[in-house]
């Protein structure tokens, strides 16, 4: 009897340990936040950011005032081939670092932003090279809201 009981208890112990390890691993994966497009408002300022929501992990962020038709661009990645408008450093504070920055402004009608609004794809340049940031269907709705807020309602 002991010959069958001891191996049975050992097997149950291993199964319980494996199940606990898998549950812990699943919890770890759920804690890993994913990058995506997020829209928020701070007073009259709209912020469209690609990064981890409610964190400082941002790739790119654009801000604008209602109807301004210009967006200010911040972030670790740069838009590919935009027609940027330079802003004097004394006027711009980087919202990510809180320090003065060499802010870059871009028309919401710029082809780089038109592509984002129309297709949900933004071409960017990183230290590793060029890539495209894609938006889901739900995120494309947020992007449309941003452009409607910044400009005339269409890109």
Image (cartoon, grey):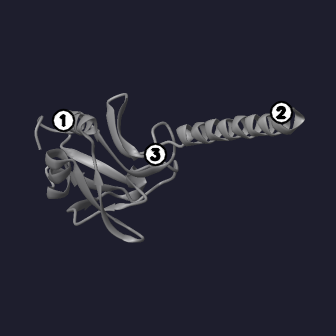
Which of the marked residues, 1 or 2, is nearer the chain's N terminus? 2
Task: Identify the residue at horizontal 40%, vertical 58% (top origin).
Answer: 89
Farthest-out residue, right: 2
Q: Residue at x 23, y 52 (%)?
A: 121
Question: Given contact means CB atoms under 8 Å apart, are the residues at marks 2 and 3 in contact?
Answer: no
Q: Tell me which corner region of the image, top left, top right, bottom left or bottom right, holds residue 27.
A: top right
| Secondary structure state at the residue bearing disc 1 | loop
Along the line of sight, the residue nearer the viewer: 36 or 153? 36
Residue where numbered disc 2 is placed: 5
Q: What residue sits 39% from the left and 60% below the top?
A: 102
Residue 114 shown left or right of residue 140 in the figure: left
Tag nearer the camera, 2 or 3: 2
| Mark 1: few/some/many CA within 10 Å (<14, 14-19, 20+) | few
111 vs 62, left or right, is left
Residue 114 in the image: x percent, y percent?
15, 51
Horizontal arrangement in the rendering, residue 87 relative to residue 106 (left or right):
right
Task: Residue 95: give its label.
Answer: 3
On-image quarter of the C terminus: top left
How many marks can you see? 3
Mark nearer the viewer, 1 or 2: 2
- Which residue has dot 1 on it? 67
Check contact, mark 3 vs mark 1: CB within 8 A.
no
Packing grade of label 3 (10 A; few <14, some 14-19, many >=20) is few
Q: Earlier in the sequence, mark 3 or mark 1?
A: 1
Measure how far apart labels 1 and 2 are at the Cα level.
Answer: 76 Å
Residue 148 percent coordinates (x, y): 17, 34
- Which circle's residue, 2 or 3, is located before the other in the chain? 2
Kindly report the distance in space between the C-alpha atoms of the residues bearing marks 2 and 3: 65 Å
Q: Residue at x 42, y 46 (%)?
A: 35
Q: CA distance from mark 3 to mark 1?
A: 21 Å
Q: Position of residue 125 (x, y in %)?
A: 33, 66
């Amino acid at each position: 009897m002991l010959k069958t009981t001891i191996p049975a208890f050992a097997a149950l112990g291993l199964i319980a340990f494996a199940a606990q390890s898998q549950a812990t691993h699943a919890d770890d994966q759920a804690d890993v936040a994913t990058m995506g497009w997020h829209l928020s408002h701070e007073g009259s300022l709209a912020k469209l950011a690609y990064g981890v929501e409610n964190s400082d992990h941002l790739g790119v962020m654009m801000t604008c005032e209602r109807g301004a038709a210009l967006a200010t661009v911040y972030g670790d990645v740069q838009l590919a081939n935009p027609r940027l408008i330079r802003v004097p450093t004394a006027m711009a504070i980087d919202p990510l670092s809180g320090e003065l920055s060499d802010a870059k402004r871009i028309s919401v009608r710029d082809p780089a932003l038109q592509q984002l609004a129309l297709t949900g794809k933004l071409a960017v340049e990183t230290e590793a090279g060029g890539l495209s940031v894609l938006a889901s269907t739900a995120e494309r709705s947020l992007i449309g809201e941003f452009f409607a807020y910044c400009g005339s309602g269409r890109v």
